[in-house]
Amino acid sequence: MGDHSYRYEALSSREIRVLRLLPGHGEMPLEAEVETRTLHLNPGEDAVADFDALSYVWGTGGKSSSIRVNGAPLAITDSLSSFLHRIRPATESRVLWADAICINQDDIEEKSLQIRLMAIIYRTARRVLVDLGEESEDSSLAVDLLDRVWKKHIWSGLVYDMHGNVLSPEIVAIYLGVNLPDRAEALADELPPDDSPQWISTVNFFRRAWFTRIWVVQEFVLARQPILMCGKTEIEWQSLLASCFSYRSGELPTGTVRVDSIQGRLAFIFMAAVRQIRHHSATEEGRRFLAEELPSGHLWEKFQTCRLIDMLHYFSISDATVAKDRYYAIVNIASDVDGAGDERLNLNYEMPLHEVISRVGRLLVQNKYGEEMLARAGLWQRTDPRIPSWVQDFGRPQSPLEMMDRTVLFQGDEVTGGLRFHAGLVLPDESSRFAPFLMVQGALLDVVDNGPFQSHFSSESLVSADILRDACDYLSKAFKALFHREDNIRYFNGDHVLDAIYDTILSGIQVTMKPREGLMKGFLFAAWLAFERKGATWDARKEWVCAEMERRYGTGREELVELLIEFISSMGYAYCFQYKQPVRTRRGYYTTLPSCFQVGDQVWIVKGCQPPLLLRKSKQYPGCHELVGSCYVHGFMKGEALKSGGLRFEQVSLH
């Protein structure tokens, strides 16, 4: 047939191509034949196709490998070539679906139509073969350790909150879909010490690119039977999920929590948990299990369903080459929308990113938990001025520490005393130049009279040799931004001013398991370092503070240094990853605001919205506001403003 590149033939709206991989062995060239299949757009739960679908990472090295399709060469990536070689049978053909080959990547119209069919493809495929990549020198060790660690500890129960409460091993086994191991055998297993270099293999394992890619989420979640493969070795995904949790008697060592592997580990926890939610939700027995046996906390309650707002937020940590893929790769796993074609969304892949973001935002703000999107939205995170300020921009990637915000960690705020959130939308017609307006009920609390300060403290500081210097620079400026010399030692609500400053600097969120009393010592340690004996060297200052605190509190130096590091980490979470900076308002309230705040911005309490919101008067639309972001106001996070009276709620227009 000659060596002209393979040419695609047009498909109808319901047709897909499948690949019949011809037999071979070793490094023999790849050969295949393309066939077409017609999909049922509404397949039943029992519908099973005659092919396996592939879930893999394209890679960044370009298409330097090839496969002969119907006798003609077609360029493919090295990663796909490696995977096909590993799963190719020696004596018989195998029918597969692989997006890079089965979709004409140069035809935008076809690509858009095929993307809409991908959910059906992965849901009806006989199996979904997941390629974690080729084996490495330590991958077998990693898989062995990950399997052993959960079997060793599951009998002690799974720790599900920061208070140390646990789920029984029987409930955990049902939830995760694993069989409980032999108890005596598991407890007798001697795992390597926590500081053993063997555990680095598990870090390397979760660094594998598959865990971090956005498209693999729906491929794994929707799969009838996902098969994880590392090299040619199959891995039980339920066991992998079980290894990622904390148990009362132990967990993966803290040394395995590395910045460059926690992304993949968290993303896998989320996608595997979502898969289990969907599995349990499919039957009456499963729904009863989710409702009656799992904890009643805010996060666990949300993890009984798969709402679009949560799916978009949790998987914002995943990597996407194209920003809009963050929406198209997720919309099909949500339980409260009917895919991209849902009449309330009506998305198509040719649609510009800002329109996708805006359409989804309009739907989310009116759904349950819409106030959470409002609390995460604002100018601080907006990437395009055409997007309304009140819409969360899921097109932007987030680090795991950014994603784990107040709306995820807990639901403790009761700023508006349990008042229900309600938002009204004013949508312009297609010919209008006006943006959509969001109408909410709000009460003005205070005004910002000071601008943000500059500091060397950053996420880079947390892993640098200058961490102490930069943290103390930030802390001293934070103190000055909040406390005035003429202030009373008691904050307006009766709290000691140091307690108020401590809570404000951390935005009211303690992200460590250490008790507050201990972390307060770390705070005082840092404060003394920031203000005392400035002429001395850092070592001399630290020595003096340690001696003074040991004398006053009886706390040993080693523990004090540990508490100092814990406090700086919590402070870094609030400032470096939640982008909140302390400032004092006109009436003297201690707040942390989005670090892009300006003089004249206003702190509002919005009915039904958990945290207070920072609004900015609109220059474009007089009488309207833009949302800057959510904030923390010490003394107003539990409905105190309503209890004291004097708040006057009015209609507020956001654009």
Image (cartoon, rainbow, N blue to C red):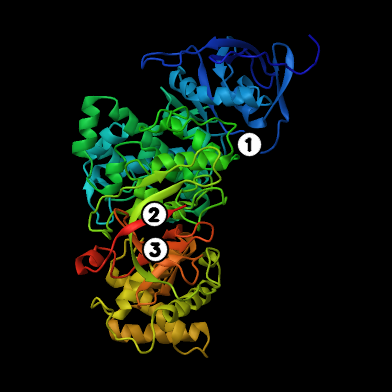
Q: Secondary structure at mark 3?
A: loop
Res. 610 in view: yes
Res. 253 in view: no
638 relative to 528, above or below: above
How far apart are labels 3 and 1 at the CA level?
40 Å
Point out the image quarter for the N terminus. Answer: top right
The amino acid type, in three-letter code, at marker 3 is: Cys
Query: Which is nearer the eye, 171 or 86?
Result: 171
11 relative to 61, above or below: above
Residue 245 placed where, x, y %? 35, 45
How far apart are labels 2 and 3 at the CA level?
9 Å
Relative placement, left or right, of 558 versus 264 is: left
Query: Which is nearer the eye, 419 or 73?
Result: 419
Q: Secondary structure at mark 2?
A: helix
Residue 497 placed where, x, y %? 31, 80
Where residue 375 is drawn, which disc sits there? Answer: 2
Q: Residue under label 1, please give it.
A: 59
Nearest to the eye among marks 1 and 2: give it: 2
Tell me, yes or no, whether the two marked residues, 3 and 1, touch with CB atoms within 8 Å: no
Query: Which is nearer the eye, 184 or 51?
Result: 51
Relative placement, left or right, of 627 versus 294 is: right
Instruction: Assess disc 3: are there few (<14), some (14-19) or many (≥20) residues with their C-alpha within 10 Å of its C-alpha.
Output: many
- State the image quarter where residue 640 is shown: bottom left
N-terminal label among 3 and 1:
1
Q: Residue under label 3, please give it.
A: 631
The amino acid type, in three-letter code, at marker 1 is: Gly
Task: Say which residue appears at 67% left-offset and 13% top-offset.
Answer: 9
